[in-house]
Image (cartoon, grey):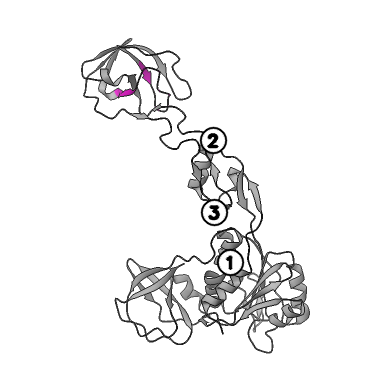
Amino acid sequence: MISVESALDQLLALATPLPIEYTTLTQASGRVLATSVTAQHSQPPFSASAMDGYAVTIKEARIDAEFDVIGEAAAGRHYRGTVHSGQAVRIFTGAPLPAGTDFVVIQENVVRHGTKMRITSDPGTDRNVRPEGGDFRKGRTIDAPRFLNSRDIALMAAMNIIRIPVYQKPNVAIIPTGDELVFPGDQPNKDQIFASNVFGLKSMLDQIGANSRIMPIARDSLESLRTVFELASESDLVLTIGGASVGDYDLVGEAAKNLGMQRSFYKVAMRPGKPLMAGRLSKSIMLGLPGNPVSAMVCGYVFVEPLVRKMQGISGNRFNELQIRLSGSLSRNGPRKHYMRALREGDKVLAFEQQDSSLLSVLAAANALLIRPPYDPARSDGDLVTILPI
């Protein structure tokens, strides 16, 4: 067995970022920006009013000052003239500030009669003006790589960026294996169970920007495995679930070897998830995950997510691990790194008592994996421990 760290390094060494393509603003959310993009103009492109009121000069903005209202400015419709001493322009939020003005008196602080306006309350020191370039200047960049979210998309739209360079989405084939499986909605016999972890992994992959598809269930024969592998042969990443252990019906490794897989490693010193296998199969990266539902999902968090991130240009070995106080106590850990399902509440984390790798209900109730190093000593209430939020 090799360590989790060594396995992850070897797995990531198999991956390189996929080619760059261009997408649109409406299709960019959840994609990874491949090269930095630059604002094409300043925002706002002119000094604009931040309030409804009257545009005047700051030196004349005082109580009892009177003005002739000579025009109006609204968003999308500027005042074309120049404002001189003793003059004001009625202005609305978002309108360009007229030439000769640098202050907006809010409408609540004035009275108006016809074309005359008088300031009746202290206008204060806030100019109520959004300065040109106050949000960003022309040439401002959004740096790559980064997963693009709704806020990034709004900013790029304001920057007038319409062709967005992104990494291609990895195409991932998920292959469930085993005679004991049927898909949800099918009718199992008395010896079968529903395939579950394939759907959890697909959801995980979809959330991190991959194109994932669930393949037909590969039955416990070399012929069935070969057929499904061939269906997945055009994928960037092939994930098999189950069949990677050492039993008489665990045939994934043999089937992959027959198809020319160059294996990088097999078996990792972790729990759950020991029977993990990785290598290259033709143009695809292959990762053989354990069949137990929780084992497959934990390996998804620890190995699949970093791998898919690297394929999209994001540093793959970066985890969002946190140090937090333990609630309760834990006995000494064994020789394998243990990823315990746990519940983080506030500034403390509690490991669930039941850690059997078949219990999806416990995983569903968890929001963190509590990470125990090999031979970690017994832990007491309040000790600092490491977690991986999920």
- Which residue is at a point 55% across and 47% down the rendered structure image? 36
| Quadrant of residue 194 within the rendered picture | bottom right
- Label 1 element class: helix
In the image, 359: left or right of 10? Answer: left
Say which residue label 2 marks. 40
**Disc 1 marks which amino acid?**
Leu
Asked if residue 204 can be seen in this view, the reply is: yes
Asked if residue 186 can be seen in this view, the reply is: no
In the image, 162: left or right of 120? Answer: right
Asked if marks 1 and 2 touch (Cβ < 8 Å), the reply is no
Say which residue label 3 marks. 145
Residue neighbourhood size for the residue with mark 2, other residues' Cα within 10 Å, grouped as few (<14), some (14–19), many (≥20): some
Q: Is residue 84 above or below residue 12?
A: above
Q: Disc 3 or 2, which lies upstream in sequence?
A: 2
Tell me residue 272's x, y (percent): 52, 80
Separation of disc 1 and disc 3 at Cα? Answer: 15 Å
Pick the front one: 335 or 143: 143
Asked if residue 100 is among those painted magenta in the image, a careful observer would answer yes
Say which residue label 1 marks. 307
- Which residue is at a point 61% across and 51% down the rendered structure image? 166
Residue that protrudes farthest toward the bottom in the picture: 248
Q: Which residues are magenta?
A: 89-107
Q: Disc 1 or 3, which lies upstream in sequence?
A: 3
- Label 3 element class: loop
**Disc 2 marks which amino acid?**
Gln
Q: Disc 1 or 2, which lies upstream in sequence?
A: 2
